[in-house]
């Protein structure tokens, strides 16, 4: 969906957030000490920007989504890392709470690929929301949990005693998920709240695995779908990398009828300007218009890079007014720091064969036909599979039929600089090794 520039509303108390281990994007470090001037930019993983540019149209659509029964009762939020998906989930939670919903924001992890672990997490989330929906239900739930935990051999009610028969957990994780969501749906209907919204981040990790007979995504979709047939009191927003959409189609054929799909991408040029200029105006610092233009064009409006560039320049230039010459002076160190903080881990995380594909693509301008990769790497087997894996990693994308390009701005430039450094290092090493008398 296309969105226009807009300011984020103030965060409201209420949304529950469950977190999981995740590697946060590296914070920017200055290359040298500077005066303690205001730095309005905040690069980081899920850190709200000082000004949320270009997303107000999407927030308006979300307000409509929670205010009525939409065509699709659930949403997916997909995009590359650094485009602001986690920030938007937090905004959605705040807007939904203001509209009378109870919300829970969870970051799923690798362990939730196991459908039993996902069922555990869903039960925890449902219990947390039920406690918010009804204080009386919270007391009853605490009692039930205590009985299940202690498992006394005999209970007494008044003058009557009996020996309880404890039921084991349902054998199937899917049944447990369905029961949990049904309990939440009933709790919503018995309350005065508008509904319950589950916001699951990193949801691309929930892909079904037939080889291991693990079906976390199928189980979750079936559970949600079972309570939405009459009225969508319980809804879910799944956020993740672009592969999430394909995982949904593979999990359930009817998934396309359950979800509206929102793609979060780079900011339009005017919105990228706002993302830099408005925080600067509030901080009493200034970048020359040519500097803002250079950053907007160089980052292609990629939200995380806008914050990274802005923060680095503010930390590295002592003057409150940054000229084009001052920017040019710190740009090489900025790009080096960006490579270490953002690109290098992604490159090193690829297999040696995948790295060769990336290096071959970097030697070509623009979109790279698959046929050209085959010609450049004739000795590499399974090239099509390698390309598909790189797409799943979010490093490249399918630009047109049979042609691919880098998904991240400046990645090609980074790989070219890396190749030059490697070439120089090898030539120096070879020269020393081959020089007589050394």
Image: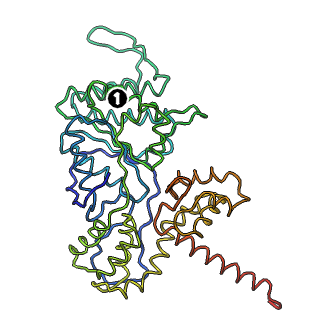
Q: Is residue 157 left or right of residue 411?
A: left
Q: Residue furthest top?
A: 160
Residue shown at the point (45%, 27%) measured from the top left: 174
Determine which residue is flagged by label 1: 181
Relative placement, left or right, of 288 versus 392 is left
Picture quarter containing residue 68?
top left
Q: Please name whichever residue, 307 or 396, is drawn nearer the observer in this view of the structure.
A: 396
**Tag 1, which secondary structure?**
helix
Residue plotted at (41% across, 78% down): 30
Residue 65 spot, x, y in % from top left: 24, 41
Q: Locate the C terminus and report the quarter of the image it occupies.
A: bottom right
Sort mark 1 into few (<14), some (14-19) or many (20+) by Cα contacts within 10 Å. many
Q: Position of residue 266 (x, y in %)?
A: 37, 61
Residue furthest bottom in the image: 437
Q: What residue sits 50% from the left and 42% below the top?
A: 111
- Give the vertical position of 310 relative to 112 (above or below): below
Furthest residue in direction right, as rendered: 436
Relative height, residue 38 to residue 248 (above, below): below
Q: Nearer the viewer, residue 298 or 107?
A: 298
Q: Is residue 416 above or below residue 13?
A: below
**Residue that protrudes farthest toward the left in the picture:** 192
387 horizontally vs 252: left or right = right
Residue for point 57% across, 50% down: 388
Residue 53 to residue 321: above or below: above
- Closest to the observer, 362 or 340: 362
Q: How many marks?
A: 1
* Residue 399, x across and y down, in percent: 49, 57
């Amino acid at each position: 969906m296309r969105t226009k520039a807009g300011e984020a509303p103030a965060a409201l108390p209420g949304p529950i957030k469950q977190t999981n281990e995740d590697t946060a994007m590296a914070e920017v470090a200055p290359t040298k000490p500077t005066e303690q001037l205001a730095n309005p930019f905040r690069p980081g993983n899920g850190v709200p920007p000082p000004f949320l540019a270009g997303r107000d149209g999407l927030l308006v659509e979300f307000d409509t989504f929670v205010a009525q029964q939409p065509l699709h009762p659930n949403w997916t939020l997909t995009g590359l890392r650094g485009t602001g998906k986690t920030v938007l989930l937090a905004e959605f939670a705040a807007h939904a709470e203001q509209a009378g919903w109870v919300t829970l924001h969870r970051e799923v992890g690798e362990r939730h690929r196991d459908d039993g672990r996902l069922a555990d997490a869903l039960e925890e989330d449902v219990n947390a929301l039920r406690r918010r929906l009804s204080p009386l239900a919270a007391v009853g739930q605490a009692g039930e949990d205590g009985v299940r935990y202690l498992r006394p051999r005999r209970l007494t009610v008044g003058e009557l005693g009996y020996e309880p028969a404890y039921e084991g957990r349902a054998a199937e994780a899917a049944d447990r998920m369905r029961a949990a969501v049904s309990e939440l749906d009933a709790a919503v209907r018995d309350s005065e709240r508008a509904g319950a919204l589950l916001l699951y981040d990193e949801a691309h990790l929930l892909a079904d695995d037939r080889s291991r007979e693990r079906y976390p995504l199928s189980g979750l979709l079936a559970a949600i779908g079972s309570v939405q047939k009459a009225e969508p009191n319980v809804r879910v927003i799944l956020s993740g990398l672009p592969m999430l959409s394909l995982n949904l189609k593979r999990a359930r054929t009817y998934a396309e009828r359950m979800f509206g799909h929102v793609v979060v991408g780079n900011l339009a040029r005017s919105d990228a300007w706002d993302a830099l200029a408005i925080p600067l105006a509030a901080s009493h610092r200034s970048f020359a218009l040519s500097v803002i233009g250079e950053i907007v064009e160089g980052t292609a409006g990629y939200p995380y890079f806008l914050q990274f560039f802005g923060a680095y320049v503010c930390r590295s230039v002592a003057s409150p007014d940054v000229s084009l010459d001052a920017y040019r002076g710190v740009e090489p160190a900025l790009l080096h720091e960006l490579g270490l903080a953002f690109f290098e881990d992604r490159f090193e995380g690829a297999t040696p064969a995948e790295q060769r594909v990336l290096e071959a693509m970097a030697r070509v301008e623009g979109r790279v036909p698959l046929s050209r990769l085959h010609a450049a790497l004739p000795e590499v087997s399974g090239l099509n599979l390698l390309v598909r894996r790189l797409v799943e990693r979010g490093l490249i994308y399918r630009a047109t039929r049979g042609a691919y390009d880098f998904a991240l701005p400046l990645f090609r430039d980074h790989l070219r600089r890396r190749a030059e450094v490697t070439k120089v290092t090898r030539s120096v090493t070879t020269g020393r090794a081959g020089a007589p008398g050394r």
